[in-house]
Image: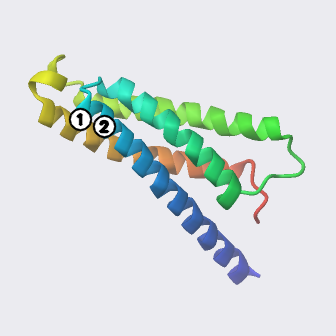
Amino acid sequence: MLNTLVRKLIEQLMKFGIVGVIAFVIDWGILNLLVGIFHMHNVLAATISFIISLIFNYLASMKFVFKHRPDMARWMEITIFFVAALIGWFMNEEIVWTSTSWMPHDSMYSMHTRSVLWTNVGKLVATVVVMTWNFAIRKSQPDDTT
């Protein structure tokens, strides 16, 4: 019994990890495209990339990772996901902003390479923090896999 539960948890963590890696590649790629090529402000770019990867993450998570709970209305499930995501977005924005807040205001132009580097450092930290938050919330709420 315990062995089966551990195996299910490991399987779910692997699926969660795969979806998370793909969402991270989407998020990181779009962020770097917007910051590195288009010189967009890192917080605005992080918002855009986060939202796009969030949509992918929701669709993939509901299809491959988590099961719909029959005792919960779909609108409630979506609400919980997006409220948790909103909190994750705030964490993401704060960490990305903090990673370059000490730099001059025009650093996206005057210190472009350094700005992109520190934006990426912030994004990596934000990814770990937000991923942990999302898994904890998702595992505690709309899931019927155990």
Q: Secondary structure at mark 1?
A: helix
Q: Quadrant of residue 145?
A: bottom right
Residue 91 visible: yes
Where is residue 56 drawn, in percent x and y?
57, 45
Where is residue 87 drawn, in percent x and y?
55, 32
Q: CA distance from mark 1 to mark 2?
A: 5 Å
Image quarter (top left, top right, bottom left or bottom right) of the C terminus: bottom right
Between 34 and 105, the one nearer to me in the picture: 34
33 left or right of 11 in image: left
Q: Which residue is mark 1?
A: 36
Look at the picture and state if 101 lies above or below 20.
above
Q: Kindly identify the residue that appears in the image at 51 percent across and 34 percent down.
A: 51
Where is residue 124 drawn, in percent x and y?
33, 47
Q: Amino acid at mark 1?
A: Gly
Q: Kindly identify the residue that appears in the image at 29 percent across and 24 percent down.
A: 40
Q: Which mark is residue 23?
A: none
Q: Secondary structure at mark 2?
A: helix
Q: Residues within 10 Å of mark 2 (few under 14, many from 20)?
A: some
Q: Which mark is residue 33?
A: 2
